[in-house]
Amino acid sequence: MTGSNVILKLRLWRLLAALATIAVGISLRLTGYEVGLPYGLVKYGGSMLWGAMVFLLVAAALPRRLRLATGLACAISLAVELLRLYHAPWLDAFRLTLAGALLLGRIFSLWNILAYLIGIALAGFLDHRLRHRHRH
């Protein structure tokens, strides 16, 4: 397989993984409480999946720069969380919508930052392991 085919395959895999992560995250947030899952799993599991999704999307855009992608995913996650400290009527109105809650969240929390970082770390670890599983 040529180098460009490997990159294309890697990008596609990461985009598909991001879509799957989005589906699981939305399902967890929308139905987790209804099926009796604990608060911490729904709240912070969703945040971990959000961080993993950010990593996968950035890593798809930068397939050969995994360290940079990891750093950017951390920076994006931190920036989105810090944005919660800014309040403007239009932004607060957007946060009250389902899309706003899922994309930006509503309330600043250091716990969310920790959950994002854990999600990014786990996604990066799994990405690395899956890419190198046949080399050992």
Image (tube, rainbow, N blue to C red):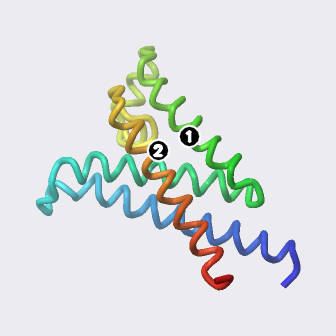
Q: Which residue position holds label 2?
A: 117
Disc 1 secondary structure class:
helix
Quadrant occupied by the N terminus: bottom right
Residue visible at 51% across and 38% down in the picture = 77
Question: Is 88 in front, or is 55?
Answer: 55
Residue visible at 78% across and 75% down in the picture = 6
Q: From this view, report whether residue 48 is shown above or below residue 90.
A: below
Q: From this view, report whether residue 56 is shown above or below residue 136.
A: above
Q: Position of residue 38 (x, y in %)?
A: 15, 54
Would residue 41 appear left or right of 117 to someone viewing this image? left
Q: Give the spatial CA distance, label 1 vs label 2.
A: 7 Å
Would residue 85 appear left or right of 111 to someone viewing this image? right
Would residue 36 appear left or right of 14 to someone viewing this image? left
Rendered image: mark on residue 74: 1
Could you tell me if the residues under marks 1 and 2 are in contact, i.e. CB atoms within 8 Å?
A: yes
Q: Amino acid at mark 2?
A: Leu
Label 1 CA crowd tier, 10 Å (few <14, some 14–19, many 20+): many
Q: From this view, report whether residue 131 is shown above or below residue 88.
A: below
Q: Quadrant of residue 24?
A: bottom left
Label 2 CA crowd tier, 10 Å (few <14, some 14–19, many 20+): many
Disc 2 secondary structure class:
helix
Q: Pick out the residue farthest to the front.
A: 136
Q: Earlier in the sequence, mark 1 or mark 2?
A: 1
Quadrant occupied by the C terminus: bottom right
Question: Is 36 in front, or is 101?
Answer: 36
Q: Report the number of numbered marks.
A: 2
Residue visible at 41% across and 63% down in the picture = 23
Q: Position of residue 74 (x, y in %)?
A: 56, 40
